[in-house]
Amino acid sequence: MTDNAKGAFRNVIFQGDSVARMRAMPSGIVDFILTDPPYLVNYRGRDGRTVRNDDNAAWLRPAFNQMHRVLKDGGFAVSFYAWNRIDLFMAAWKAAGFRPVGHIIFRKSYASSSRFVRYTHEAAYLLAKGDAKLPHQPIPDVIDMPYSGNRMHPTQKPVAALLPLVHAFCPPGGLVLDPFAGSGSSLVAAQHLGRDWLGMELDEVHAATASRRLAYWGEKRAA
């Protein structure tokens, strides 16, 4: 594939099914994957908002199979997950060929819900493809996560908590992929740090929100 064709996958957000979109991509062109996929918990927020495809796992293995294919050898992926669905996520990661090499806790200053315990953190696994090299400056495995307000997405992640991940695991000028882009927080983090970005989002409204958000911050950087 020519450089011009590869450029079609940089600094753009595709609306639609991410598995189909990734299947149209050449292998090994992504430097880092940072994604917050549906947790398979049939999420419903206090305001009634829901997340597409959070009620089934049919997409899980195909999506991570394609993520592994498009990621460069030696590259990393960070995937958020639900603690009570770890069996499904871990099986999908390993079946795709990923190797878990780290676990990251995102510490909140608030409880997102309270049942048997108060839920005051999010979690993600650091996954490697092939012979991944150790980072020069490893980041801590506990990162503060300020409240995003969830204004643009029912499970919106704050950009501040994602910046260290992009900085540590994507080289300068590299390409960051998020196949479940939501409102685009991971892509904004990539843009802030001068990395190229590629987002995919099934929901039309969220895809439009992410596109506007990236355009806004792109104009701010250029000003």
Image (cartoon, grey):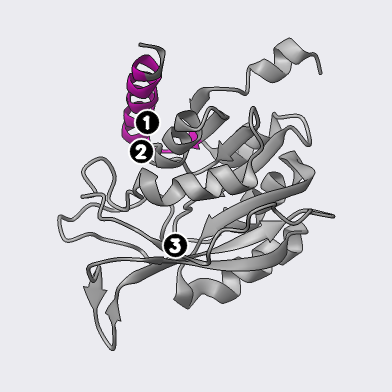
> Considering the numbered disc 3 on the image, is that residue within a helix, a strand or a loop?
loop
Question: In the rendered image of this protein, does residue 141 appear above or below residue 159?
Answer: below
The percent position of residue 57, horizontal first and vertical second, equals 53, 61
Question: In the rendered image of this protein, does residue 136 appear above or below residue 216?
Answer: below
The percent position of residue 6, horizontal first and vertical second, equals 71, 19
Q: Nearer the viewer, residue 156 or 86?
A: 156
* Residue 42 is a magenta residue: no
In whole angstroms, how far apart are the C-alphas of marks 1 and 3? 20 Å
Q: Residue at x 55, y 30 (%)?
A: 197
When asked about the image quadrant of residue 130, the answer is bottom right
Q: Answer with mark 2 or mark 1, whichever residue precedes in sequence.
A: 2
Viewer can see residue 16 = no
55 left or right, relative to 176: left
Quarter placement of the N terminus: top right
Q: Residues within 10 Å of mark 3 (few under 14, many from 20)?
A: many
Q: Residue at x 84, y 55 (%)?
A: 131
Q: Residue at x 77, y 53 (%)?
A: 129
The percent position of residue 160, horizontal first and vertical second, equals 37, 47
What type is the residue that disc 1 sits on? Ala
Instruction: Mark 2 and mark 1 in contact? Answer it, CB < 8 Å.
Output: yes
205 left or right, relative to 37: left
Q: For mark 1, what is the residue?
A: 210
Q: For mark 3, what is the residue?
A: 39
Looking at this rendering, what residue extends furthest in the front direction? 137
Question: In the rendered image of this protein, does residue 178 appear above or below residue 2?
Answer: below
Quarter placement of the C terminus: top left
Q: Which labelled disc corresponds to residue 74?
A: none
> Considering the numbered disc 1 on the image, is that residue within a helix, a strand or a loop?
helix
